[in-house]
Image (spheres, helix red, strand yellow):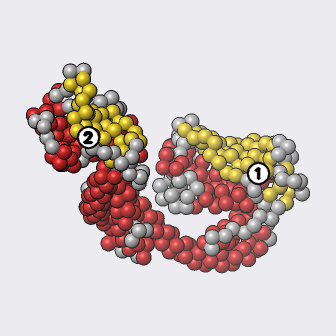
Amino acid sequence: MLNSLSGRFLVLTIVFVMLAEVLIFVPSISRFRLDYLADRLERAQIASLALLADDMLDTELEAELLENAGVYNVVLRRDEIRQLMLSSPIPQEIAGTYDLRMASAFTLIGDAFLQLFSAENRIIRVIGAPVRDAGLLIEITIETAPLRSAMIDYGIRVLLLSAVISIFTALLLFAAVRAFLVRPIKGVVGYMQRYAAAPEDARGIIHPSAGVRELREAEEALLQLQTELTQALRQRERLAQLGGAVAKISHDLRNILTSAQLFTDRIEASEDPLVRRLAPKLVNSITRAVSLCEGTLAFGRAEEPAPTFARIALCELVEDIVESELLVSDETGVEILNEVPKGMMLRGDSEQLFRVVMNLVRNARQAIVATGIAGRVTIAAGEDDAAWWITVSDTGPGLPQRAQDNLFTPFQGSARKGGSGLGLTIAAELIKGHGGSLVLRETGAEGSLFEIHLPKGDGTL
């Protein structure tokens, strides 16, 4: 119970109420001592007035007056004359004098606690002002044992009352905390546990109902989290199903393309000059299509084959991309420029780099064609002592914000209607396998620019 929120509130409430009562007890015990001494002064004054009324009191009556007043001696100063009104033998010497007329609050508190913690029975002199101005001062002599006993009785009553108040207050707070905090928190925890056990069950999604603002904000935050997570889980399930379908299609398509590769051997034997010129392009295209299918299968298994590094003539690779893209494209008005320096060599996997650059060029060309306005796609490259870089820029319309936010997310980062967005995801993974990065440097109304960054590493092949 003490480890629970309500249990700790119960303990803390008792502690704090008792602390408050202790702080109240300090001045109250001082006030009780002051009232006790004032009462003795008043009784002594009344006894002395009886003596003034009849100054022939016998010894027995005088002793009875002193006993009723609870004092040993009474001295009254009237008209600048100090008179010993009543007296009796004092059992010991006077241990101290306390003038109540000029004592400050701190002095009274200090004297009270000294008296409370001193078990010795002493004789003290107490000086005060007579009631109703019946003289200049009144002075009495009393013993401290009855005073300390009365103070202890008073303190016990105060502490018992404090304990009752603190326990009662703590129980009320315990009930309030359970009703307004613990129960709603348990409700939120229950929703979380039910949702964790069965995320697909809509009954596990919380319905905010708390009246406390902070708890309401927590419930609304949990609702948003559950909603987003449910959508993500549903999307993951759909992607898994789609991935299985794509894997099957890619497997069958790979078999078909493998058969097509066999037929290209006969095409290469043709004497037609056009066929002989286009046959190598067809062979390369089919080979890349087979590699793409294999790569798609690997992506479906959440893995991509490691790159096979070799020295690559980048200008020739880009030229091959440009020719292949122009052959498969019937659109006019899109110019593709190869501005890679001739003779530039880099280290990488030629098939994977071909796929990456081809994907960027094709995306740029399709974006320009969608506008219906002539444009240009430019492939450039450069190097320094640390890295190579390849840029693909275009004069297209730029990427919309949604595509920028989900640029490398499968099936979400496409800027083209009907696109899957898988191309950029695979491209980013292929470049990451080279130890590099693929980033969107700029995009806007004047076009976009992608940059491939490939580190040189410790050496070259």
Residue 87, labelled with which disc? 2
Q: Nearer the viewer, residue 420 or 24?
A: 24
Residue 428, labelled with which disc? none
Q: Does residue 128 appear left or right of residue 197 in this picture?
A: left
Quarter of the picture containing the N terminus is: bottom left
Contact, mark 1 vs mark 2 (Cβ under 8 Å): no
Q: Does residue 370 appear left or right of residue 315 in this picture?
A: left
Q: Residue 194 location in percent, x, y?
A: 38, 74
Based on the displayed image, in which of its 4 quarters is residue 225 positioned?
Answer: bottom left
Residue farthest top in this picture: 80
For the point 34% across and 59% down, the residue is: 14
Q: Nearer the viewer, residue 438 or 22?
A: 22
Residue farthest left in this picture: 53
Q: Does residue 417 appear left or right of residue 169 in this picture?
A: right
Closer to viewer: mark 1 or mark 2: 2
Residue type, mark 1 in image: Leu
For the point 30% across and 52% down, the residue is: 146
Residue type, mark 2 in image: Ser
Q: Residue 373 location in percent, x, y?
A: 53, 40
Q: Does residue 144 appear left or right of residue 434 in this picture?
A: left
Crowding at dot 2, Cα within 10 Å, few <14 / some 14-19 / many 20+, comes out as some
For the point 17% across and 48% down, the residue is: 60
Separation of disc 1 and disc 2 at Cα? Answer: 112 Å
Q: Residue 87 location in percent, x, y?
A: 26, 40
Residue 454, labelled with which disc? 1
Crowding at dot 1, Cα within 10 Å, few <14 / some 14-19 / many 20+, comes out as many
